[in-house]
Image (tube, rainbow, N blue to C red):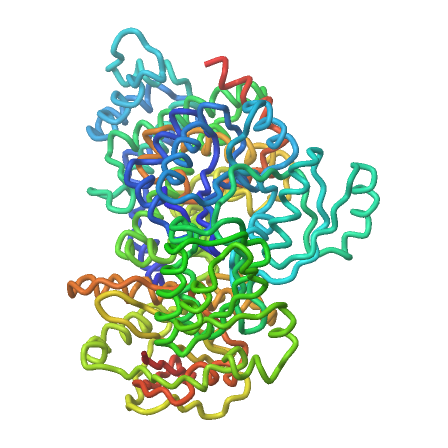
Amino acid sequence: MISKEKIEHYVEKIPPTPKALKDTLTQLSVGELTKAAKIAESDLALKSYLKNLVNKPIYGFRNEVSDISQIFGILGVSGSQQTVYNYMTTLLSPAKWLMFKLNSSSFHELQARLSKRWKDILTHLDINNKDIESSIALLPASIIIAEALFSEKINDVNLLRSTKDMDLNTILYRLNGIDLFDICEEIAIKWEMPPEIADIVQASSGLKPSESKEINTLAKWMHLLLFYELSQPVFIKAGLNDFIDFQVDFVADIYEEFMTIMDKQ
Amino acid sequence: MRAIVKHGIGVFTPQGFLDGNSAESLLGIEDVEAAKNLKVDMVLVSLKRVVFFNKNGLDVFLKMFSKIREVNPILVGFSDYDTTKYNAINKFYPDDLGFSLFKTQEIAELFTSSFKNKHKTVLLYNEDKSQRSAMAIELHDSGHNPIITQSKEEFLKKKKSESSYDVVLEESYLGQMGQKVATRVTGNAIIYTVSSFLDAEIGNTFNIAYHNNSLNVGFRLFIFDMFKVISMNIHAINFFSRLASAAAEYNATICFVGLSFDKTPDSFKNTLEDSGIMFFDQMNEILQDKELLKELGASSAGNVKNKRVLNKVVVTELPQFIDATVATIEMMTNSTAVKDAAKVHEINVKDKGDKIASSIGFYGDIDGMVILVFPKNIAKKACELLIGEATDDKELILDALAELVNIVGGKVKSLLFDQSISVEITLPRTYENVDNLLEITQNRKGVQVDLSFDNDKFLFFLTR
């Protein structure tokens, strides 16, 4: 159904980080918000994405924010880096979604919701680390990869899943020994993302615990956050609720605490 | 979201957070319609991957349960929960549950008519005495051996020796019963348990799809346990006469055991006998008599007189069947198939050792049966995707093989549908060795196609 060659071909096709983004990230990494904003201004697609994202209702700004330096100022270094990574993830998304009933707007909505709530979680956990904050940006790449690999085989996948309760991640892993999160990691390496980002996303599958206790804790929160969002009607209708398996036991011990944060919103 | 059907149970598996909004989004109108048309003994909503639910969320599924039961009076309910979830559900619906609760799907399966589900020793406890009795009766009628504990203390004490029981049944509840005729499989016979007064309603409560499926996959002896039947009217007589006529086409036998004619006219017995139904006083008269069992067809299907032959319509569609099989196994193994030869004759399995088989029937615009014979190694490889790991557990492999042949059946159905041919598929059946298969296919001609998957030989057989 999906061969190793197809996966390799997919990963090969992923473009390297565009120069403007690389330069923006370099400036952000040294805390130069103004210089980063100036470079970002030169990439019109990035500029448009940033404006679109921060003006979504979940960010709660009363007036429209349109100036990039203003956006970076509001988001801060960590938030700006995360948003640039979010934009990079969207570069992988298909022109037309076939497997999932998504479009660029609903996908951006998912990114915005995950980013905002991830920030809330990190604040609650008293974690202030820009790479950890950015890790959430890589998570939706798993959806894009699933779309890219499985969309040509929708009928086969549906037939298989009509007989067996099996998520896309499991199908991919059992066929090739590689899962969606492994491919996310390959993308992170290709894009020279800090290794911590891929580590957290890998562990957030709930299937591959990290050796680091801190990463495992963050992974739990990320896993539960993902399913909190994938239980929203818009994403259920998009067919995302069961694209990967929810590991209830993995998150059982943080559930109550998680809900206190979500209830505050 | 659609239910996945396995062992006679349709299961919905929602994930994450289940409130009124999310549940409404999970269950569309088409999903409910599809659930109403499922040919199953039970529809369940598994809560194993739900971290949070509220009453509004469950209510959405309750509405679906009502709609299902309006057209199909089967068991419906929730499964796969822990004690916290069990208590929450009971708290949401304190007066009358109206649906069933099964702590695990293994427990739920005890109350279905799956071919796999036989003679389990069940340790049973429920705080409610009437529930304990209802469960015990249902389990008994389904051919299991319930060990009822009368108190929590007794239950906990006995539960310590868990290995003495096949299933421990607790924190479960039987809601509105299925009204379906209890069914169990013993050897190569199927036993249906019916009770009280039988009238036209028997046509609704008897699972005719399951019965036809059993005929299609080779069962030839059907025993009705009639001990609890008080009487029957002419509508029930007509129903059984029709059943007997249909069975005759397969050379199958229908027996009534323990039916008292105190309140039923003798003429009814004559009518039933004329239609071919046999009468016995005790179950053991049949089950303990090997000669009689053989005569009645329960030890072999080889004595079928009216052999059904392949017809042109089925053979014309052969490429669809081959394509479906090849595509499915290629999909499951990421390998490529080569067709070696196709011939019309009786099934010919070279080197029977270390092979397993499975079959699936189809009926509708055309009817017949697809049989797949695998060397155990290909079966294991083809089933790795379904099982998730290499295994030598024969039961696990056979179970996965049933799922695989079900996928083949689904693919056949869809390819034929593209040709405007409408068929339904039966439940799959598996055979742990070739001899078991040959009992069913003896003297039947069909098209045999030998295939190779990465040089491993594999046999496809299409017959009627």
Q: Is residue B181 above or below residue B22?
A: below
Q: Nearer the viewer, residue B44 or B412?
A: B44
- In the rendered view of the protein, which quadrant contains the N terminus of chain A? bottom left
Which part of the image, by quadrant, shows the C terminus of chain A? top left
> Foreground: B189 or A153?
B189
Where residue A131 appears, as percent x and y from the top left, is: 48, 31
Q: Position of residue B117 (x, y in %)?
A: 57, 60
Q: Is residue B159 above or below residue B165?
A: above
Q: Residue at x 38, y 75 (%)?
A: B248
Give A98 or B354, whichever is nearer the viewer.
B354
The answer to whether one can see residue A45 in this image is yes
Can I make out residue B359 in this image? no
Residue plotted at (55% across, 27% down)? B96
B258 left or right of B128 in image: left
Figure quadrant of residue A239: top left
Is B58 situated above or below B223? above
